[in-house]
Image: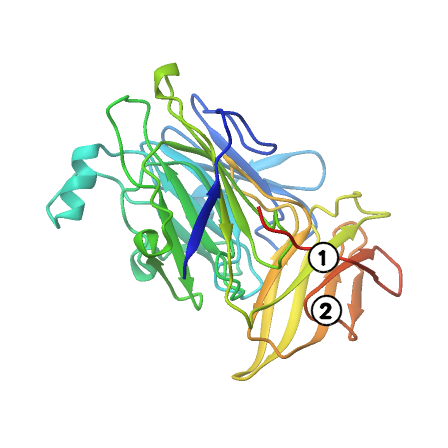
Amino acid sequence: MRIEVQRAAQRPGSIPGAWRWPTRRSPTLAPPARPNEHRDLYVSNIGYNRLYENDGQGGFADVAPRAGVLQPAGRSFACWFFDYDEDGRLDLWVNAYSASIADLAAEALSLAHDGVSSCLYRNKGDGSFEDLAAQTGVNHPWLAMGANFGDMDGDGWLDVYLGTGDPLLESLMPNVLLRNVGGERFVDETAASGLGHLQKGHGVAFADFDQDGDQDMFHHLGGFVPVDAFQNALFEKRTPPGHRWLVLSLVGTRTNRDAVGARVVLHLETPAGARVLHRAVGSVSSFGGSPHRQEIGLGDATCITRLEIRWPRTAETQVFTDVPLDAWLEIKEGELAFESHERRSFHF
């Protein structure tokens, strides 16, 4: 996989959806970790983290101890819900922020260190989670500030990009790309992808900026103090021919207009057999931002046999069976047909 840097913005700035440096907490709001229509709230913290369960009556209850998602204790930062293993249940990434440059260097040399590893909580479907960071290869002390998830190679599996750094002027460490391998493990492809930028990483946005069917990445760069400023970067992805894709713009009529909280289920046929992909609209990282439209890599899919849209307010499911590949579709809640839009690609 090769990702090329095409241009960088001329001065530091912010991007829509990217959150500023939090002094104490970094919250993320997402479609529920439980199978109902209510949005829950996870808060990474200094100390134990919190999972606030929405009771649907205007109240929240902290269920983090019961759910098993208190860690990493000490200091956590970027966090988000996403379905990394494509089983239809939202899992939870929580990045630890308790390490030093010395800890990172020691770990690279396979030496003992005091850095705290991040957690990847797999949703067990019964209201609890299990930390599979070690089993999936992400039990490392990355100092990630800006971070996000997206599909960097168009294979349908959600990858992770970590914008690393700390406020100290002298701190320099590569930002990190983790490629999702079949929902079973993550592989560090920072060097191979060319995404190991050394400057301090803040907001990260995945979006198909050039409308060619794959996700590019915008990265807000620069440190805490004015003299540590740096140009932002826009990385253009050039996916090899043969990867299929689908873009969905969902419009709520009884649900909120942006369809936040809706679930998308895609049934595919591939040369290896049937496959199912799941997406949650509005689920993004704290310190990261992505469009509400769903830009879905389909890998080597040969056809889409079924598309399901599950709307959160009405609990209705729209089903389509005549869905084209490599298309941009607008779907309105409650309507029987979708609308196709022309998508013109370009090069920067």
Image side of residue 137 versus residue 21, left or right: left
Q: Looking at the image, is mark 2 or mark 1 nearer the viewer? A: 1
As rendered, which of 150 and 221 lies closer to the eye? 221
Q: Is residue 69 visible?
A: no
Q: Position of residue 247 (x, y in %)?
A: 68, 58
Task: Give the residue drawn at x 16%, y 34%.
Answer: 102
Q: Which residue is mark 1?
A: 248
The number of numbered discs placed on residues in the rendered structure image is 2
Image side of residue 282 versus residue 159, left or right: right
Q: Residue furthest front?
A: 347
Q: Position of residue 218 (x, y in %)?
A: 51, 40
Q: Secondary structure at mark 1?
A: strand
Q: Which residue is mark 2?
A: 307
Label 2: few (<14), some or many (≥20) within 10 Å?
A: some
Amino acid at pointer 2 = Leu
Name the quadrant containing residue 171: top left
Q: Position of residue 115 (x, y in %)?
A: 22, 39
Q: Secondary structure at mark 2?
A: strand
Amino acid at pointer 1 = Leu
Question: Is the N terminus in the top left, top right, bottom left or bottom right quadrant?
Answer: bottom left
Figure colour scheme: rainbow
Label 1: few (<14), some or many (≥20) within 10 Å?
A: some
Task: Give the residue drawn at x 38%, y 41%.
Answer: 95
Name the quadrant containing residue 306: bottom right
In this rendering, the answer to whether 334 lies above or below 140 is below
